[in-house]
């Protein structure tokens, strides 16, 4: 019991509901502020929306998380570091939304955030050599942050994926008895759901880099904080990858497409899974539902596999790998709109 006379699941419900309601109320305010300060994403380049749409959705999500985040972390230095890192990356993303931050600077700040996590104990934790574990931890943080930034290329995708991802993390943490990680994970899920009210097609506000980097860092950090050291390494690794499965898959697809096309990876275009599905005639709402549903499936599989013995995890991992590769090849063969350079401040 968390508190005498209070069911164990009540604090988790509060952790979800409070950020959801706060974000639901604050997002229209953020949209009005965005119009006043001209923080708008205007059509052009590879972008598919037809009217200027406010950024600053990430600010509403961050604000919605603050109260529960402060309550959940308490005096826990690791989780305080997670919140500070998330808000730092959100600030960097916000600057990138209204101006432009060079990719090298963004990567350096993301790497620094990953290093800070490692020093407070939020680590990959699967390698015996300390100075190998550090770069693996940093690589994971950079990969997941950019995966969420990349998947935020169409209405409802990033927040729609973050919610089931965070719910999966929270469920595993709750089953492991890790109240702090579970509470913060459910808060992330709640804030994402609250934001979706305004971000589903046709979106009235975008997360912007501030929001996508915030959510990506939180998912990366919380997966590192999952205390699954007693579980087989294979099961833990597979579970963690699945918890960010959809954004990581889209990242893999985009990198492969741009390398095969002999284009710089950092030059944006319309070669994401969402663009390919849209070119095939699927509506934006259907695409958003597909992405969210795929992450729900990944999260459910992660919850199941993390408790399985090593042999079962190996077989499951092999099946996941085959499906991953088949989907990758299939999507690479689908036509997509002509790639275009990203305008200043645009999303890749």
Image (tube, helix red, strand yellow):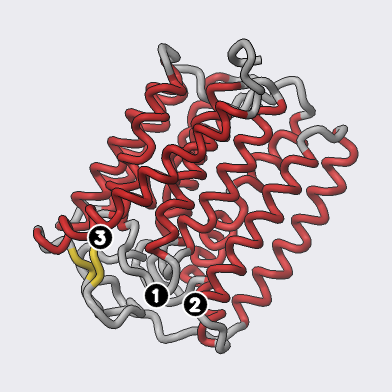
Classify the position of the C terminus by image quarter.
Answer: bottom left
Q: Report the residue marked by disc 1.
A: 202
The picture places residue 72, in percent across and down from the top left corner, at 46, 23
The quadrant of the rendering that contains the N terminus is: top right
Q: Residues within 10 Å of mark 3 (few under 14, many from 20)?
A: many
* Label 3 residue SS: loop
At horizontal 34% and vertical 67% (from top left) the residue drawn is 267
Q: Residue placed at 48% from the left, 52% from the top? A: 193
Q: Which residue is mark 3?
A: 55
Residue at the far front: name it.
Answer: 5
Q: CA distance from mark 3 to mark 2?
A: 19 Å
Mark 2 neighbour density, 10 Å: few (under 14) some (14–19) many (20 or more):
many
Of the pair 128 and 208, the residue shown nearer to us = 208
Rendered image: mark on residue 284: 2
Q: Earlier in the sequence, mark 3 or mark 2?
A: 3
Judged by depth in the image, the label closer to the viewer, 1 or 2, is 1
Q: Is residue 202 above or below residue 39?
A: below
Q: Residue furthest right?
A: 311
Horizontal placement of 300 versus 85: left or right?
right
Look at 29% across and 49% down and name the residue there. 26
Q: Quadrant of residue 31?
A: bottom left
């Amino acid at each position: 019991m968390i508190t005498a006379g209070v069911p164990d699941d009540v604090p988790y419900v509060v952790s979800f509901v409070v950020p959801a309601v706060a974000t639901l109320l604050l997002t229209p305010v953020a949209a009005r502020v965005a119009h006043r300060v001209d923080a708008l994403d205007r059509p052009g380049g590879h972008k598919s929306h037809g009217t200027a749409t406010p950024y600053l959705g990430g600010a509403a999500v961050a604000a919605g998380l603050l109260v529960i985040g402060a309550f959940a972390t308490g005096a826990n230095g690791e989780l305080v570091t997670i919140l500070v890192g998330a808000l730092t990356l959100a600030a960097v993303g916000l600057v990138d939304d209204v101006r432009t931050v060079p990719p090298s600077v963004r990567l350096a700040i993301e790497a620094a955030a990953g290093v800070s996590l490692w020093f407070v104990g939020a680590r990959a934790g699967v390698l015996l050599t300390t100075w190998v574990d550090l770069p693996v931890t940093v690589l994971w943080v950079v990969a997941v942050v950019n995966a969420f930034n990349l998947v935020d290329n169409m209405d409802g995708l990033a927040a729609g994926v973050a919610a089931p991802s965070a719910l999966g993390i929270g469920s595993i943490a709750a089953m492991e008895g890790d109240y702090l990680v579970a509470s913060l994970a459910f808060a992330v899920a709640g804030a994402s759901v609250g934001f979706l009210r305004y971000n589903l097609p046709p979106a009235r506000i975008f997360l912007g880099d501030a929001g996508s980097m915030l959510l990506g860092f939180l998912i990366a950090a919380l997966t590192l904080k999952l205390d699954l050291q007693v579980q087989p390494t294979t099961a833990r690794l597979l579970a963690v990858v699945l918890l960010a499965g959809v954004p990581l898959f889209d990242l893999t697809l985009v990198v492969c497409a741009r390398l095969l096309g002999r284009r710089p990876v950092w030059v944006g275009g319309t070669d994401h899974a969402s663009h390919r599905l849209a070119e095939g005639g699927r509506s934006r709402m259907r695409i958003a539902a597909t992405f969210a549903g795929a992450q729900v499936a990944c999260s459910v599989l992660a919850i199941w596999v993390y408790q399985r013995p090593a042999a079962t995890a190996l077989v499951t991992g092999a099946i996941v790998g085959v499906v991953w590769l088949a989907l990758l090849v299939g999507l690479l063969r689908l036509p997509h709109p002509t790639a275009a350079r990203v305008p200043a401040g645009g999303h890749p």
